[in-house]
Amino acid sequence: MPLLAALATLAFLAYGNAKDGAPAHHPERAVLAITFLLALFAADVLVAQLARRTAVAVGSVVFAAWIVAERPIFGAPPGSNPWEDRRAQIERGRALAGARSVVVIPCQYEHFALLAAYGAPERATIRAGTGAEVTPSCPSIEGVER
């Protein structure tokens, strides 16, 4: 509403000035209220933009700190995860090489080394993961067709 009032004031001043010039014989006084209103709105927009950018910047810093806290910068030390050693799964996959098809039931995401060593992942059926703790015997292998 204040901006509409300022626009209407400017229109009336322009109309009056065009007719006889009396409303705007001191133009700085006539547009002072309009200038003041526009300055207030400009300040409001500036503060809102700074607040928004500050919030984005603070959010970005917090997110980056969370990422760094979740994952060490140089990665987890080797051997820190029990499923990191893929030798057992690679051996199991090599033993399956030559099978026409296999059914794999993973625990979590540890079955990729087995499938790579199997050599024909397109012939493997992957069931839903069980979510069980990862051990060297995961994943379960069923339905081996030779």
Image: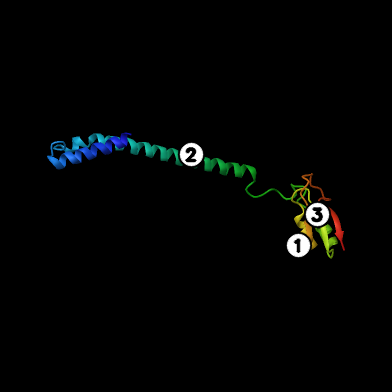
Count of labels shown? 3
- Return the residue nearer the eye: 113 or 15: 15
Q: Which-is-in-front pick, marks 3 and 2?
A: 3
Q: Which residue is disc 3 drawn over?
A: 104
Q: Which residue is disc 2 drawn over?
A: 55
Q: Are marks 1 and 3 in contact (CB under 8 Å)?
A: no
Quote the CA–CA distance across marks 1 and 2.
Answer: 48 Å
Pointer 3 or 2: first along the chain: 2
**Residue type (three-letter) at the residue carrying disc 1:** Glu
Q: Looking at the rendered structure, which numbered label has been put on residue 122?
A: 1
Judge left or right: residue 94 versus residue 109: right
Q: Considering the numbered disc 2 on the image, is that residue within a helix, a strand or a loop?
A: helix
- Return the residue nearer the eye: 136 or 107: 107
Q: Indicate the quadrant where residue 41 lies.
A: top left
**Residue type (three-letter) at the residue carrying disc 2:** Ala
Pointer 1 or 2: first along the chain: 2
Q: Are marks 3 and 2 in contact (CB under 8 Å)?
A: no
Question: Which quarter of the image is occupied by the N terminus?
Answer: top left
